[in-house]
Image (cartoon, rainbow, N blue to C red):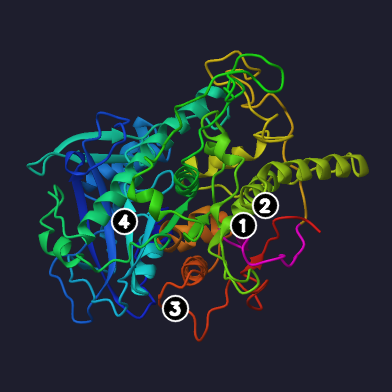
């Protein structure tokens, strides 16, 4: 079937003004300075791919294939990820062999284009979602690189990739990290499992950031992936690593990871509290009962770490189809209740400030009203109040039209795990009253949560709503946009690798246009803090300053609150 729909999958060339180079890294964690505890002893290295602008004359005799090596094992892992049984796995693997020939439109280990800015090249970290790896979003990060951005794409070893191979000092595969299958029913066990994965992801982001910063300062690391000494040397003093200047982006689980990471660092001085949290007096101020601090957040940056200086209210953030369910466990919801850092930006005039935080939703995620409203709450100045408002609207609408039902039909998805993420929409909100009253017992406590039921003691869900275009009071709040006729996979390489498949099965059109809109949005938030980056648009790009962009209405503004 795949061969009929798209016999030779290929990736389009990047549309930015620069040619793109790439280098693969796998660095032993023993060489990276970190005060954090290793969350999984199996993980001895961090792995990432660097995408960067290169000189026009750069060439390479060696191609970089989209499917990583060893391809046979990767095909088998993807076949298993897609749900193929042992009986049909060989058939599925044969079909997937088609994408073995897809190449990244890059130059391997090319020289870094000298920066025209005295500050150096802008830097973006991009976290992948379920079923991804460091190549899966090459169209997004490669396009950014073609606009002058140095992009860092980690390959997470938390069990969210179909597989991931860890090499030793001889360059041999020593072990693999298999994919972890978890139910999408948000019970305690599932939320704990997702939070355990988040713990690994946050630690990996810290180490990856530390490695890039050290390379910019002239340090060279052992690289188990390949001989990259020239690439590392070329990075010295070429990257803009000033506070608030690094961009953080991700897709799906990666967007949740970036959200948790940015907030964890920004709010590092605060400790998470559950219903057993200790006040300064050692007693609950509400009822006098004994309470305790929960001092084990998923990630806590040390006060003297470079990250604490790096992540500020100015830091650009881009969230593509943010999967909010992992943010609602007992160890994550304390940050859920806090706003995105952009609300604390200190600008001379909020009306003249450009947005530095954006979220983009595919049609597949947007039509799930509860998931949409959960994203709107995440981006609101007070997520708790936003949830309350959505709940009041829901009750009012139910009383006015008690028989109305929300249409939850959706197209099937060739990546089953990504499709199942939509079950997030049925989860009750993490907070329904206030930041204080919404605290719940930890999984080990005796709270109202059950191991098989909802993750919250309340069974309510977010309110359905029909958004109307509402102008914000200032430019400090995040922007939220919806791309009609797009799929969840449209924000990754799968949309352009299999355009006919996503068109006929998921009703997604113009995959290259969808990717372009997402990339332009990321570039726009970078410009919002004054970063010098290129453009994919003709003339001045005002993608975040409009409600609808073209006659086809492929870019629609979504308000964070209803009128």
Which residue was labeled with disc 4?
99
Q: Are the two marked residues, 3 and 1, in contact with CB atoms closer than 8 angstroms?
A: no
Task: Kindly report the distance in space between the C-alpha atoms of the residues bearing marks 4 and 1.
Answer: 26 Å
Earlier residue among tags 3 and 4: 4
**Which residue occupies the foreground of this view, 459 or 137?**
459
Magenta stretch, residue numbers = 467-486
Position of 364 compared to 143: left or right? right
Instruction: State whether residue 404 is above or below residue 442.
Output: below
Q: Is residue 483 magenta?
A: yes
Task: Kindly report the distance in space between the C-alpha atoms of the residues bearing marks 3 and 4.
Answer: 30 Å
* Residue with the most extreme front position: 281
x and y, in percent, of residue 409 in the image: 67, 46
Position of 394 compared to 449: left or right? right
- Res 127 visible: no
Q: Is residue 548 magenta?
A: no
x and y, in percent, of residue 20 in the image: 28, 71
Residue depicted at 82% across the width and 41% down the height: 392
The circle drawn on residue 535 is 3
**Which residue occupies the foreground of this view, 122 or 226?**
122
Which residue was labeled with disc 1?
363
Task: Kindly report the distance in space between the C-alpha atoms of the residues bearing marks 3 and 2.
Answer: 30 Å
Dot in front, 4 or 1: 1
Position of 153 compared to 337: left or right? left
Residue depicted at 67% across the width and 52% down the height: 367
């Amino acid at each position: 079937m795949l061969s009929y729909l798209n016999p030779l999958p290929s990736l389009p060339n990047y549309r930015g003004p620069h040619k793109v180079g790439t280098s693969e890294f796998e660095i032993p964690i023993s060489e990276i300075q970190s005060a954090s505890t290793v969350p999984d002893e199996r993980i001895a290295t961090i792995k990432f791919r660097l995408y960067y602008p290169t000189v026009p004359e750069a060439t390479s005799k060696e191609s970089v294939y989209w499917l990583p090596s060893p391809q046979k094992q990767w095909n088998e892992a993807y076949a298993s990820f897609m749900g193929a049984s042992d009986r049909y796995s060989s058939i599925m693997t044969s079909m997937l062999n088609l994408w073995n020939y897809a190449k990244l439109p890059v130059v391997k280990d090319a020289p870094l284009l000298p920066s025209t800015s005295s500050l150096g090249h802008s830097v973006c970290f991009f976290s992948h979602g379920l079923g991804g790896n460091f190549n899966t979003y090459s169209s997004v990060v490669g396009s950014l690189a073609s606009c002058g951005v140095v992009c860092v794409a980690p390959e997470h070893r938390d069990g969210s990739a179909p597989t991931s191979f860890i090499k030793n000092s001889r360059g041999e595969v020593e072990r693999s990290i298999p994919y972890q299958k978890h139910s999408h029913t948000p019970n305690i066990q599932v939320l704990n499992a997702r939070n355990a994965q988040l713990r690994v992801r946050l630690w990996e982001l810290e180490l990856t950031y530390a490695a890039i910063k050290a390379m910019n300062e002239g340090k060279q690391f052992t690289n188990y992936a390949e001989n990259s000494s020239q690439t590392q040397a070329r990075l010295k003093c070429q990257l803009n690593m000033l506070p608030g200047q690094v961009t953080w982006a991700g897709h799906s689980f990666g967007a949740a990871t970036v959200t948790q990471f940015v907030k964890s660092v920004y709010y590092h001085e605060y400790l998470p509290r559950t219903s057993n949290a200790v006040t300064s007096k050692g007693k609950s101020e509400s009822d006098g009962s004994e309470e305790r601090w929960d001092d084990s957040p998923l990630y806590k940056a040390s006060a003297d770490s470079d990250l604490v200086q790096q992540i500020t209210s100015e830091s650009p953030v881009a969230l593509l189809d943010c999967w909010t369910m992992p943010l609602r466990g007992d160890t994550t919801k304390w940050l859920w209740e806090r706003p995105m850092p952009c609300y604390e930006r200190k600008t001379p005039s909020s009306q003249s400030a450009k947005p530095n935080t954006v979220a983009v939703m595919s049609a597949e995620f947007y039509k799930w009203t509860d998931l949409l409203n959960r994203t709107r709450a995440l981006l609101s100045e007070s997520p708790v109040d936003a949830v309350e408002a959505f709940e009041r609207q829901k009750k009012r609408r139910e009383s006015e039209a008690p028989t109305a039902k929300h249409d939850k039909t959706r197209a099937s998805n060739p990546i089953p795990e990504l499709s199942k993420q939509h079950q997030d929409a049925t989860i009750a909100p993490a907070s329904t009253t206030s930041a204080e009253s919404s605290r719940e017992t930890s999984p080990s406590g005796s709270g109202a949560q059950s191991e098989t039921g909802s993750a919250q003691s309340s069974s309510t869900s977010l309110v359905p709503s029909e958004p109307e275009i509402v102008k914000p009071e200032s430019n400090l709040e995040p922007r939220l946009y919806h791309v009609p006729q797009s799929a969840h996979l449209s924000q990754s390489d799968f949309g352009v690798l299999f355009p006919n498949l996503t068109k006929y099965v998921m009703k997604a059109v113009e995959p290259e246009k969808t990717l372009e809109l997402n990339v332009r949005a990321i570039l726009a938030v970078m410009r919002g803090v004054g970063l010098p980056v290129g453009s994919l648009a003709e003339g001045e790009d005002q993608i975040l300053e409009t409600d609808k962009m073209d006659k086809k209405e492929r870019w629609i503004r979504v308000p964070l609150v209803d009128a």
